[in-house]
């Protein structure tokens, strides 16, 4: 991986870890801050809402900033927010620090994806974005477990110290390796210089609106199942509780592989990449439902679900980049919000499925229905695109080119 992409991926790893690590240290935070565990859990909700609402707003307000300067500024906000979290004397201050920190998340991820595309040749942009998305994979596989162990042994504040220290390192790497001058693009796609009103017009595009709806449904399908993996494996598969953590690593390895393959598929053809990723997700969910009661097949199905579930991320982001010529970073940031909405929708759908009296195994079928809906919308979008233009749109349509290449993604 080229060093500029590595620096950006590690930055995404930081913001991703900050979002998910709270779940592992809720008991320690609840006890120390003298609040209930559900109240402590709202620290996750507050962060997610900040990402969902703040991301597009911050991206819009900073559209004229240089990409490198914006990345460094966002990491500064992230570091400051986590320092306040370390020193927070009470729950209210900690909640404020979490919301403040979250304002950097959506824009940082969107701009990192955009910069990765700017630094890569047109036929490798989805692969480059997939490498940035690996940061979220590693946040779940490594960042959160390490932060949880640190918090359990040295106190929850030490978890934020760990995140802060790593964020400072990432800031230095971005400063050193990410090139400057990434402010202009190809003719007709100078996003940073466009008036705010012109950028907002991008949301009038039916293709962008439909793409974001597909993101919500597809990501919702993933979280409908992934939120309930522990009870699925323990209660349906009969795995010992001690094995659940190991099996989640299997899921994580699958997610890394799927992320890479999804990027490569989207590089060849964006819409076919989207359709293949969603078809694979639908098939893996149905397979998981069939295999869940049988341990060996369940492990294989878990791996395939991880691969298929995370192959959709680079494919969907590549689609957003292809249709949002006037404001790619703003559209990517809005799609980050769509992913977060999908996370919440999925967790709710899974809970409602169980609440209606179905066993936990049924969440895979609910997820399959959501995936089928996303796939149907994708097919309609693909058919409309073929009707409007006999030649399929290239991924780099409307994407700014590099001011000075920083090395191709291998």
Image (cartoon, grey):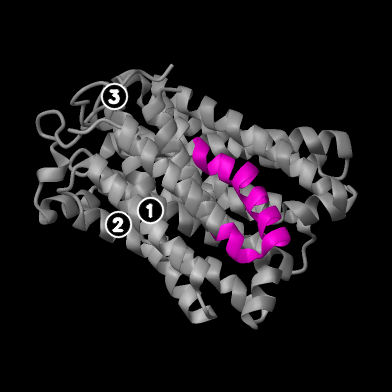
Which one is in front, 96 or 358? Answer: 96
Of tags 1 and 3, the one toward the viewer is 1
Q: Is there a contact, CB below 8 Å, between mark 2 and mark 1?
A: yes
Sequence-wise first label, 2 or 1:
2
Residue 37 visible within the image: no
Q: Position of residue 341 (x, y in %)?
A: 47, 59
Give the magenta range.
134-160
| Mark pair 1, 3: CA separation | 26 Å
Label 2: how many Cα within 10 Å (few below 14, some 14–19, many 20+): many
- At horizontal 22% and vertical 25% (from top left) the residue drawn is 402
Overall secondary structure of the magenta stretch?
helix
Q: Quadrant of residue 397?
A: top left
Residue reaching furthest bottom?
34
| Mark pair 2, 1: CA separation | 7 Å
Location of the C terminus by quadrant is: top left
Q: Which residue is mark 2?
A: 56
319 above or below 71?
Answer: above
Q: Which residue is mark 1?
A: 106
Question: Is 384 displayed left or right of 166 in the figure?
Answer: left
Residue 324 visible within the image: yes
Question: Is 173 displayed left or right of 392 in the figure?
Answer: right
171 above or below 122?
Answer: below
314 above or below 358?
Answer: above
Q: Position of residue 228 (x, y in %)?
A: 71, 56
- At horizontal 46% and vertical 28% (from top left) the residue drawn is 263
- At horizontal 20% and vertical 32% (from top left) the residue drawn is 398
Residue 394 is tagged as 3
SS at mark 1 in the image: helix
Of tags 3 and 2, the one toward the viewer is 2
Label 3: how many Cα within 10 Å (few below 14, some 14–19, many 20+): some
């Amino acid at each position: 991986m080229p060093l500029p992409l590595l620096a950006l991926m590690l930055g995404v790893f930081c913001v991703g870890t900050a979002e998910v690590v709270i779940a592992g240290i809720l008991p320690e935070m609840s006890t120390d801050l003298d609040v209930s565990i559900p109240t402590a859990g709202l620290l996750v909700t507050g962060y997610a809402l900040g990402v969902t609402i703040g991301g597009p707003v911050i991206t819009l307000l900073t559209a004229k900033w240089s990409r490198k300067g914006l990345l460094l500024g966002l990491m500064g906000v992230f570091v400051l927010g986590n320092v306040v979290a370390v020193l927070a004397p009470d729950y209210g201050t900690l909640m404020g620090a979490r919301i403040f920190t979250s304002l950097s998340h959506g824009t940082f991820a969107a701009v990192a994806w955009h910069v990765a595309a700017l630094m890569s040749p047109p036929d490798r942009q989805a692969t480059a974005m997939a490498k940035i998305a690996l940061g979220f994979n590693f946040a779940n596989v490594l960042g959160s477990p390490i932060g949880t162990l640190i918090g359990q042994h040295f106190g929850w504040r030490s978890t934020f110290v760990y995140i802060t220290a790593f964020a400072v390192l990432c800031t230095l790497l971005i400063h050193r390796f990410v090139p400057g001058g990434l402010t202009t693009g190809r003719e007709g796609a100078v996003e940073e210089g466009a008036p705010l009103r012109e950028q907002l017009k991008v949301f009038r595009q039916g293709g962008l609106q439909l793409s974001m709806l597909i993101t919500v449904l597809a990501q919702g399908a993933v979280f409908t199942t992934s939120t309930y993996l522990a009870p699925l494996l323990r209660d349906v598969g009969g795995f010992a509780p001690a094995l659940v953590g190991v099996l989640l690593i299997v899921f994580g390895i699958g997610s890394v592989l799927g992320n890479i393959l999804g990027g490569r598929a989207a590089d060849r053809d964006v819409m076919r990449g989207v359709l293949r990723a969603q078809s694979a997700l639908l098939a893996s969910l149905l397979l998981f439902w069939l295999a869940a009661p049988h341990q060996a097949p369940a492990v294989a199905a878990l791996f395939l679900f991880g691969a298929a579930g995370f192959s959709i991320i680079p494919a969907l982001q590549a689609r957003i980049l292809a249709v949002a010529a006037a404001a790619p970073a703003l559209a990517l940031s809005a799609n980050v919000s769509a992913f977060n909405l999908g996370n919440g929708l999925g967790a709710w759908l899974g809970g409602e499925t169980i609440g209606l009296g179905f066993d936990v195994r049924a969440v895979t079928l609910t997820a399959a229905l959501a995936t089928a809906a996303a796939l149907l919308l994708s097919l309609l979008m693909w058919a409309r695109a073929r009707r409007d233009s006999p030649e399929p749109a290239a991924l780099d349509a409307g994407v700014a080119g590099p001011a000075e290449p920083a090395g191709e993604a291998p």
